[in-house]
Image (cartoon, rainbow, N blue to C red):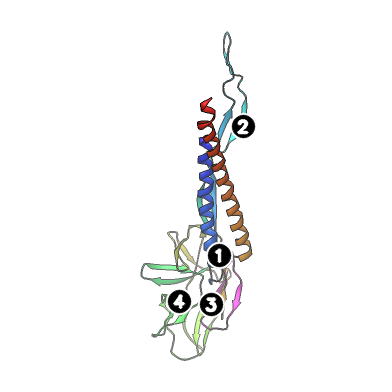
């Protein structure tokens, strides 16, 4: 019975973590370039269950234990990792020349006070000095550093990331990719950090779409269904603890008196 309390508690803790992840996905369904997360759980080691208090027969040359094997007892689960789904989000046309979406596997490079970070959020603007920056004011990097635009002129960005103003080439956006996207670490503000090597993205793998933004790949309906499922699983684990607690109460206060 004591084991049941720990098993139920581990289920409640796991579903709390799952609820936090789903809530974050729901909060970012309208965030450009957002990639949803999934909580991955790992089952704790199972235990063999035998029937107790059966007699043990001692033979001439061996001990015979007739206590039968009943089955396996699960000891609960724990959060193993939070995995990010990097599947493509829907491309939404905005007609803003500095709204840029990526179709395929790739990331923009941006310069932050903590170093170079990566993002799929292409809702860029131009600062007072003429540099292309993110919504948080971080420089968007090109192959030769931050991209500086003239104050006037028509901005055209090709599928390869080449930036021209009034027909004059001013730079090329640096689009990178990773062999193992699972090693990317979310840093907040829709930015990623990585300790693994990155490579220049192949033009055939990723394309730049000007005047559009990539939407979040989190779906409101599916996330709400997952949230309800997590609540139901939490309640079930809570019921396990309640039932075990009531059984222990009867064992201590009622049966022990007999």
Looking at the picture, does residue 213 appear above or below residue 3?
below
User: SS at mark 2?
Assistant: strand
Reading the image, the residue beneath label 3 is 100
Residue 95 in picture, x, y percent from top left: 57, 83
Q: Are marks 1 and 2 in contact (CB under 8 Å)?
A: no
- Where, quadrant-wise, is the C terminus in this rendering? top right
Reading the image, the residue beneath label 4 is 135
Reading the image, the residue beneath label 2 is 71
State which region is magenta.
88-105
Looking at the picture, does residue 76 appear above or below residue 95?
above
**Nearer the viewer's eye, disc 3 or disc 4?**
4
Q: Are marks 2 and 3 in contact (CB under 8 Å)?
A: no
Looking at the picture, does residue 64 appear above or below residue 194?
above
Q: Residues within 10 Å of mark 3 (few under 14, many from 20)?
A: many
Tell me the CA gap for discs 1 and 4: 21 Å
Residue 64 in picture, x, y percent from top left: 59, 16
């Amino acid at each position: 019975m004591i084991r049941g309390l720990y098993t139920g508690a581990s289920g409640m803790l796991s579903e709390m973590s799952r609820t936090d992840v789903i809530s974050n996905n729901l909060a970012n369904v309208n965030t450009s370039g957002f990639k949803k997360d999934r909580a991955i759980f790992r089952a704790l080691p199972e235990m063999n269950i035998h029937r107790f208090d059966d007699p043990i027969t001692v033979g001439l040359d061996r001990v015979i234990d007739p206590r039968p094997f009943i089955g396996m007892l699960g000891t609960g689960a724990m959060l193993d990792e939070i995995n990010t789904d990097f599947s493509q989000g829907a491309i939404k046309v905005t007609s803003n020349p500095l709204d840029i979406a990526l179709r395929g596997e790739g990331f923009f490079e941006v310069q932050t006070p903590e170093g170079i970070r990566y993002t799929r959020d292409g809702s860029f603007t131009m600062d007072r000095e003429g540099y292309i920056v993110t919504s948080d004011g971080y420089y968007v990097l090109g192959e030769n550093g931050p991209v500086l635009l003239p104050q006037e002129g028509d901005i055209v960005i090709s599928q390869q990331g080449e930036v021209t103003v009034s027909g004059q080439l001013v730079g090329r956006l640096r689009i990178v990719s990773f062999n193992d996207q699972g090693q990317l670490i979310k840093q907040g503000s829709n930015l990623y950090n990585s300790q693994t090597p990155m490579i220049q993205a192949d033009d055939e793998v990723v394309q730049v779409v000007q005047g559009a933004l990539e939407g979040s790949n989190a779906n409101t309906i599916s996330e709400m269904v997952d949230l309800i499922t997590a609540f139901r699983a939490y309640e079930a684990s809570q019921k396990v603890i309640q039932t075990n607690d009531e059984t222990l109460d009867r064992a201590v206060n009622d049966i022990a008196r007999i």
